[in-house]
Amino acid sequence: MFRTCLTQSTRCVASSSSTSLFHTSAIVSAAPRKLTNKAKEERKAEKREKALANRPSVILGTRSGEEWRWEQCDLAKVLVKEAGLAGPPAMQPIEVSVGTVHVPKQFAYGVTKDDAKLLFDKLPEMSAYQGVKDHKDTEKMNETWRLGVVRELKKATEFAKAIDLRNADAEGIAYENRRRIIAEFSAPENPFDPGRTEVQAAILTYRIRNLWNHLTTNKKDVGNRLGLRKLVHHRAKILKYLKRTHRQRYDILLERLALEPESVEGELIV
């Protein structure tokens, strides 16, 4: 009888252990749960938000937190910033034929270094000498020359103050920036080529940046938003043409303008 009881108890333990190892609840808990339609939509929305957050701005061309790319690109380096023109005028002395003239560091109205040499060196000398040749007396010639030099030196100093870029308005600064952009992005064989694709894309990028800064500070200006969209799409069309015709020039230009390829390729939504 004792053996019978022992055998039955052993069978009970074995059966309980086997059933615990192969219980159906373990299989049910391990099986993946099916997502509901609402959960799927939420997951898709999260993925879309992450993709949009990582995508560069179609307006600025850079990703969030990478504005340093714009500061280091070629276009930003050649532009004149209004903040840099604030403060007292900084004049630098130069020696010319009539004496020492203090000229500004940056000229307005498109005056170049060659133009400055002509305006402050050649022309004053010619004007001062204009009345000297009419006198045959040496003393009168010297006195006329001295008075002419004083007169022309004063005129050159006043003219230098007038063409200082610090005196220019917003339109004058924009004109100077367009001139610099054309000179920077033109080909070496044609140093001033406004119709070049790189020049057009650079000017559009400059205008887009200016308009974006204006809209950032003037949020109620709804009328210029349409103009911003048109500029962005116009730049995208120009870059698309350059990519199709000259891929190497396209890649170089994006780097010089601090534009990511994703910001100008594909569908644009501004």
Image (cartoon, rainbow, N blue to C red):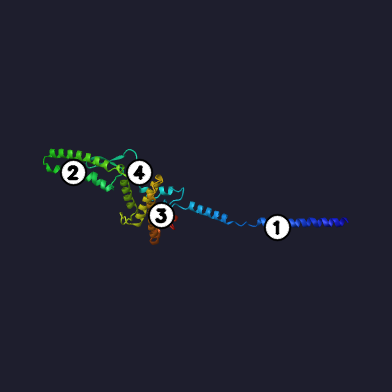
Residue type marked 2: Ser
Please name the amino acid that badge 1 sits on: Thr
Left or right: 26, with 137 as reference point: right
- Of circles 2 and 1, the one toward us is 1
C-alpha span from label 1 to label 4: 76 Å
Q: Secondary structure at mark 1?
A: helix
Q: How many numbered marks are there?
A: 4
Evaluate if marks 4 and 2 touch, with contact meaning CB atoms under 8 Å apart.
no
Q: Which residue is mark 4?
A: 82
Q: Could you tell which of marks 4 and 3 lies nearer the N-terminus?
A: 4
Pair 2/3: label in front: 3
Look at mark 3 in the image and give the residue it sits on. Answer: 254
Residue 250 visible (yes or no)? yes
N-term-proximal mark, 4 vs 2? 4
Whether residue 249 is visible to the viewer of this picture, yes or no, is no
Disc 4 marks a residue whose amino acid type is Glu
How would you rate the neighbour count of disc 2 (Cα within 10 Å): few for under 14, some for 14-19, many for 20 or more? Answer: some
